[in-house]
Amino acid sequence: MRLDKYISDAMICSRSEADRYIKTGKITVDGKTVKKPDHKVTEKNEICFNGEKLFYSEFIYIMMNKPQGVISATDDPKNIEKTVLSLLPENYLTKGLFPAGRLDKDTVGLLILTNDGKSAHRLLSPKHHVDKTYYVECDKDFAEKDIEICKNGVILDGELTKPCILTIDCEKKNCGTMVLTEGKYHEIKRICNHLGKNVTFLERITFGNLSLDRNLERGMWRHLTPGEVGVLLK
């Protein structure tokens, strides 16, 4: 591919910014400075920016610790709500990123942003049953019987939910974790309502085999490592 496209994709920058880096001698290919944006390169070449090696990826995968008050959408037609994309740098907004699955406006925690539509569809497809774990706090204590009720499923909108694995916190009985294999509208909140409780705090902590990075503060994000991408897509 052209060197400017490689730089644009690897550094998440615009093509014009990539051209500027190339023409000002900041880019080397296999140890030699190249100043032509249309220079052809492959993934076998070692391409560096100011001496730091760059890695090309066809797609972008981001982990975000979603804060409250932000919607899981690419935009808000009414320009009222703040979206998760607004938490990213401006140069990411042209990369076609979108949330792979949604979290409610007041739900926090692990959210995956990507521009890999095919993989995102597979991750969200009901037939693949990707588990998602949530930490939940309610206004009333959970009871042991609630575990069996969740496991057997409850009726929502005339349909029986798939088994939900409830684990009650040993010390704070109004807290626990719930593992879902589907994504019905407000499912955890509605299950808890069925159990006679209201959810007061909800946080997604795992998506498949990927866990929320506890070093990420609310509203912060980072790229997934190649190993994490492999875990996610597996």
Image (tube, rainbow, N blue to C red):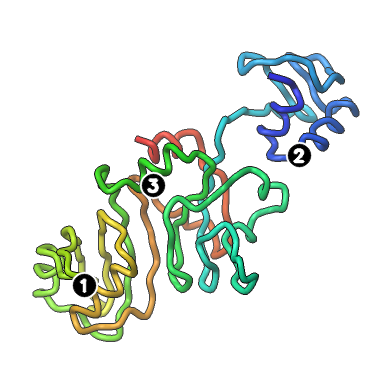
Residue shown at 89% from the left, 26% from the top: 23
Q: Amino acid at mark 3?
A: Leu
Query: Residue 152 — which label?
Result: none
**Is tag 2's residue or tag 3's residue first in the polypeptide sequence?**
2
Q: Position of residue 133 (x, y in %)?
A: 31, 58
Q: Position of residue 231 (x, y in %)?
A: 38, 38
Note whether 166 is above or below 2 in the view shown: below
Q: CA distance from mark 2 to mark 1?
A: 51 Å
Q: Amino acid at mark 1?
A: Cys
**Is tag 2's residue or tag 1's residue first in the polypeptide sequence?**
2
229 or 120, which is in the foreground? 120
Query: Residue 170 — which label?
Result: 1
Query: Residue 14 — which label?
Result: 2
- Horizontally, is 179 left or right of 204 in the view? left
Q: CA distance from mark 3 to mark 1?
A: 25 Å
Residue shown at 47% from the left, 40% from the top: 117
Residue shown at 55% from the left, 68% from the top: 70
Query: Between tags 2 and 1, which lies in front?
Result: 2
1 or 178, which is in the foreground? 1
The secondary structure type at the circle numbered 3 is strand
- The local crowd at label 1, few if under 14, some if 14 to 19, many if 20 or more residues have their Cα within 10 Å, is few
Q: Position of residue 142 (x, y in %)?
A: 19, 78
Q: Position of residue 135 (x, y in %)?
A: 33, 67
Q: CA distance from mark 2 to mark 3?
A: 30 Å
Query: Residue 210 — which label?
Result: 3
**Is tag 3's residue or tag 1's residue first in the polypeptide sequence?**
1
Q: Where, by quadrant of the figure, is residue 27 drawn? A: top right
Q: Amino acid at mark 2?
A: Ser
